[in-house]
Amino acid sequence: MPFRSDRSVRTARSGTVPHDAVHHPVFARYYARFSAGAERRMGLGALRDRMLAGLSGRVIEIGAGNGLNFAHYPSAVSEVVAIEPERYLRQLAVEAALRSEVPVDVAPGAAEALPVKSEAFDAAVLSLVLCSVRDVPRALGELQRVLRPGGQVRFLEHGRGGGRVMTFTQRAMDRTVWPALSGGCHVSREPVAALRAAGFTLGPYRRLLVPEHGPPLPSSYCALGTAWRPVQ
């Protein structure tokens, strides 16, 4: 049920958020096809189940993409506000929201300027999004703002990993053509360190390879876990 009438969501109709904060039409179509197949082939569907298990209350999802998380939210979630800046992916997310068993609002917006009220959410979800955010510290500052004190962050993010050769390769990719070819993605960022630097309290998390089997790719080094906004 996209664009429900919740006052905490300032949708595109209010004029506060541009419709196309991000515009990658070619990559968005490639990503939509690739990501659907990766759910089973690379085990991402099972990882989404683990990431979202036990969530409840109001949830904000940053960079919802084509809405692949929506089918994995537990029934205790009362509402998901899904922010997606890319137009084509947002359209797919709206379609996924209509099929979801929990209420989902899909809205345009950028991670660095979330179109929602402060302290409005019990939890936040970061799923393969920090790699492509333009300003990670600012985006995580916004996440601190919109979470209630004690609110939790569930994350599944990829970043720097492997030995010296792999990390050199990742950095070289980020400095050259990779972000332009992949919708702004960077493979050498450190999402766990970024969450800690932004003031979140890190809970349990684990490092893993995606896919689990086969030779690792520059984007294979992932972290799955939980963090919290401190109460004070």
Image (tube, rainbow, N blue to C red):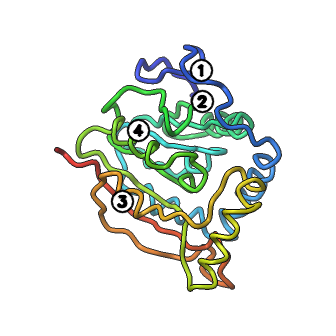
Residue 170 pos. (x, y %): 64, 72
Helix, strand or loop at label 4? It is helix
> Going by the image, does 173 lie left or right of 71?
right
Distance from the alpha carbon under mark 4 to that under mark 3: 17 Å
Q: Which mark is residue 226?
A: 3
Q: Tell me which amino acid carries mark 4.
A: Glu
Distance from the alpha carbon under mark 1 to that under mark 3: 30 Å
Dividing the picture into quadrants, the one containing residue 165 is bottom right
Residue 132 pos. (x, y %): 61, 51
- First of labels 4, 3 by sequence position: 4
Dividing the picture into quadrants, the one containing residue 13 is top right
- Discs 4, 3 touching: Cβ within 8 Å: no
Badge 3 density bin: few <14, some 14–19, many ≥20, Cα 10 Å:
many
Distance from the alpha carbon under mark 3 to that under mark 2: 25 Å
Residue under numbered circle 4: 142
- First of labels 1, 2 by sequence position: 1
